[in-house]
Amino acid sequence: MSLSGKTLFITGASRGIGREIALRAAVDGANIVIASKSAEAHPKLAGTIFSVADEVEAAGGKALPLQLDVRDENAVREAMATAAEHFGGIDALVNNAGAIRLTGVEHLEPKRFDLMYQINTRAVMVCSQAALPYLKQSASGHILNLSPPLNLAPRWFAQHGPYTITKYGMSMLSIGMSDEFKKYGISVNSLWPKTIIATAAIEFELGGRDAFKRARTPAIMADAAHAILSSTDRSITGRLLIDEELLREQGQTEFEQYRYDPQGGSLVPDLFLD
């Protein structure tokens, strides 16, 4: 189970879960395309495509930082071509870039819905289309979308329905593309955390840094993503996976090391999980 020599194209990889997936793969000696809008330092958010590229190289991988807005399909196609030329192909696409606003229909600005739809749902289609010619040439091509299981309980729609449907759109594309791309030998899955993860999304949308005391680190998502992306022969495909559940399937039994705060309280389940 190694990603040595494999090329991963990761959107939104300048921080959070995307960065952690990149660094985990870099330990194997993978080639990482860090595709994100963040080319300059942000006053509130750590990380840029260039800082993560340095971290990837330090961890043992090879890095290609590319500034990219996943809403621009022409830029996405150009970025995929640049990445494939630079590394000699693309073996995996990780659709990690996301936008969130936990607001109901009554008060959500339409332009904010447009942003979430474009970055969450539409970008999965656009990036997958652009990566497909290269994934077809891989011995074990993968598409991994960071999106949840399809829980249709009304409470997941009542409070933030617009966000919910843009994330569920990603998951439905996972199911569809797994079957559509079966003839090419490409695996397609979704991955979601069992508990909240200590990221900027939690800090700014779900309770601030105090919530980190009851969260896990992004490392658990990175380990789960590694297990998926290093699988072969479509042994894992068409699934809406939960990080801890997948790792248990792989034989892992200890999870305390993923706690952000070892002295924190009970872990909080993530959105869309009962």
Image: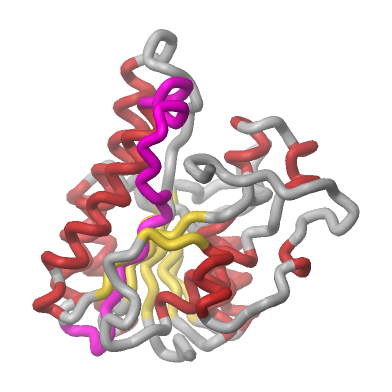
* Residue 46 percent across, percent down from the top left: 66, 48
Q: Residue 201, relative to residue 66: is it above or below?
A: above
State the image quarter where residue 235 is shown: bottom left
Residue 7 seen in the current view = yes
* Residue 126 percent across, percent down from the top left: 21, 51
Q: Is residue 147 magenta?
A: yes
Residue at 41% over, 90% down: 5
Q: Would you say the magenta stretch is mainly helix, strand or loop?
A: loop
Q: Nearer the viewer, residue 169 or 10?
A: 169
Q: Residue 159, relative to residue 3: is it above or below?
A: above
* Residue 180 percent across, percent down from the top left: 11, 65
Q: In this image, 122 relative to 52: left or right?
A: left
Q: Nearer the viewer, residue 250 or 78?
A: 250
Q: In this image, 225 relative to 111: left or right?
A: right
Q: Is residue 115 magenta?
A: no
Residue at 57% over, 45% down: 270
Q: Nearer the viewer, residue 179 or 8?
A: 179
Residue 66 seen in the current view = no
Residue at 13% over, 78% down: 184
The part of the chain drawn in magenta is 137-161
Q: In this image, 184 relative to 36: left or right?
A: left
